[in-house]
Image: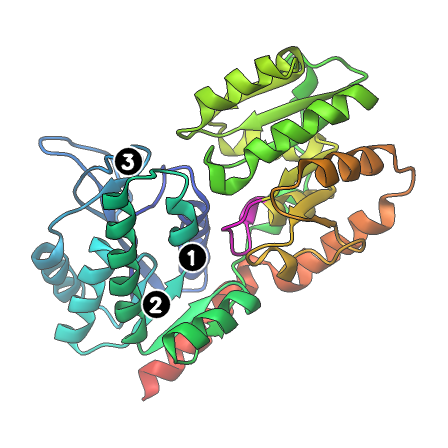
């Protein structure tokens, strides 16, 4: 089956959707299918060595968040490419320009269209700008996106609670398909990398890790505030890995709170470095208000590292409080600091780690995710 995947974001962009799609395409290929990714990244006059299944369209940086690019006019080129490839199905991963190009291609070529909802960008937008004009644009974009998603033959998302919310707001069926990871990569120890030595962390310090975009919706400011209280009670180091518009504000706040010497801002970390960091951390924290089922928490759980997440978005669909991890109220640094200290002081975490690893193996493998989508693809192709 030739599957055309349309997404504004793809590798090497360092975000969850991009990493998921990279692994997803590998697994599709391993099972004998032919994925083709239609995405951004091509710049006027540029050349890049690229895998044959990735088709990039001329794009510009998104002004409010330059980590991302948008392709303002991919529609005709994407349709020509899809027709040339003789695709069997369109799978839209983002609802903007590339998603619209995918929808147009699917309609013109009369092939099934699957849509996947990855991001609550209404919540995410609050991290980028308080401008009334921008907020108005986001509301328009959301209405446009729901209109696009509503017209797909099948709509999926990774979180059960988000699926229920979308069903109510869009008045259509939304299927829950968990997004998986390559479990073996995260469960097998990475040899040779000593995180404490690499980042100058004292050998007797616990490692509290955040890994993700540095935006307000991710709750990283709450973690910094909480860590200041944690540091008063025990020796620990806060490791913040990722890039984003809030980095400068976070660095400044760590200085104000007197925790700068015990905080490491790593910027972007590559995949091998990420796995070592997750495996050697004492706890991984993500108290986001906008995430569905964050891959970084799934990855940490696969590593056997304890996790703390927020009771927000789709995170409670991943973490069973007290059994596979810890849940806290989003935006509450006092509760978060208390739970971090309790977890770091816990002498018996093996059952929680084991439960988390079993949960990931059972529900969040890439193989299971791909097979679930293939069942959807095949049913649509028969209709």
Precedes in sequence: disc 3 or disc 2: 3
Estimate how packed mark 1 is, as few (under 14), some (14 to 19) or many (20 or more) residues with alpha carbons within 10 Å: many
Checking the image for residue 115, the label placed there is: 2
In the picture of the structure, the residue carrying the numbered disc 3 is 64
Residue 170 screen position, x and y as percent: 37, 74
Q: Residue furthest bottom?
A: 383
Q: How many marks?
A: 3
Image: 206 above or below 278: above
Does 204 lie within the magenta span? no
Q: What stretch of residues is rendered in magenta?
A: 288-296
Checking the image for residue 118, the label placed there is: 1
Q: Please say if the residues under marks 3 and 1 sit with CB atoms less than 8 Å apart.
A: no
Residue 119 screen position, x and y as percent: 42, 54
Of 266 and 144, which appears nearest the observer? 144
Secondary element type, mark 2? strand
Estimate how packed mark 3 is, as few (under 14), some (14 to 19) or many (20 or more) residues with alpha carbons within 10 Å: few
Of 327 and 59, which appears nearest the observer? 327
């Amino acid at each position: 089956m030739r599957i055309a995947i349309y997404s504004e974001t793809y590798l090497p962009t360092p975000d969850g959707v991009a990493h998921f799609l990279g692994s997803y395409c590998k697994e599709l290929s391993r099972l004998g299918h032919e994925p083709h990714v239609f995405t951004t990244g091509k710049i006027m006059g540029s050349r890049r060595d690229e895998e044959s299944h990735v088709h990039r369209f001329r794009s510009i940086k998104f002004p409010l968040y330059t980590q991302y690019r948008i392709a303002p006019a991919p529609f005709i080129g994407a349709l020509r490419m899809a027709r040339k490839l003789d695709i069997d199905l369109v799978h839209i991963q983002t609802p903007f320009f590339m998603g619209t190009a995918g929808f147009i291609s699917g309609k013109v070529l009369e092939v099934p269209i699957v849509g996947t909802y990855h991001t609550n960008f209404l919540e995410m937008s609050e991290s980028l700008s308080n401008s009334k004009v921008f907020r108005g644009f986001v509301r328009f974009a959301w209405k446009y996106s729901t209109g696009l998603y509503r017209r797909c033959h099948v709509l999926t998302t990774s979180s059960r609670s988000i699926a229920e919310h979308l069903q109510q707001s869009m008045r259509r069926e939304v299927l829950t398909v968990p997004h998986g990871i390559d479990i073996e990569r995260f469960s097998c120890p990475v040899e040779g990398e000593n995180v404490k030595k690499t980042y100058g962390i004292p050998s007797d310090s616990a490692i509290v890790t955040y890994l993700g975009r540095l935006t307000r919706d991710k709750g990283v400011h709450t973690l910094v505030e909480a860590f200041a209280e944690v540091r008063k009670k025990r020796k620990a180091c806060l490791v913040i890995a990722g890039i984003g518009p809030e980095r400068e504000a976070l660095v400044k706040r760590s200085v104000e709170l007197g925790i700068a010497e015990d905080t490491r801002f790593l910027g972007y970390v590559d995949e091998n470095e990420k796995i070592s960091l997750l495996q050697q951390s004492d706890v991984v924290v993500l108290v986001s208000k906008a995430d569905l089922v964050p891959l970084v928490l799934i990855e940490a759980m696969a590593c056997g590292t304890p996790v703390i997440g927020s009771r927000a978005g789709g995170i409670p669909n991943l973490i069973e409080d007290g059994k596979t991890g810890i849940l806290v109220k989003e935006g509450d640094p006092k509760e978060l600091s208390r739970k971090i200290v309790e977890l770091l002081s816990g002498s018996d975490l093996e059952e929680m780690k084991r439960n988390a690893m079993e949960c990931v193996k059972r529900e969040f493998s890439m193989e299971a995710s791909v097979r679930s989508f293939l069942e959807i693809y095949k049913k649509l192709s028969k209709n």
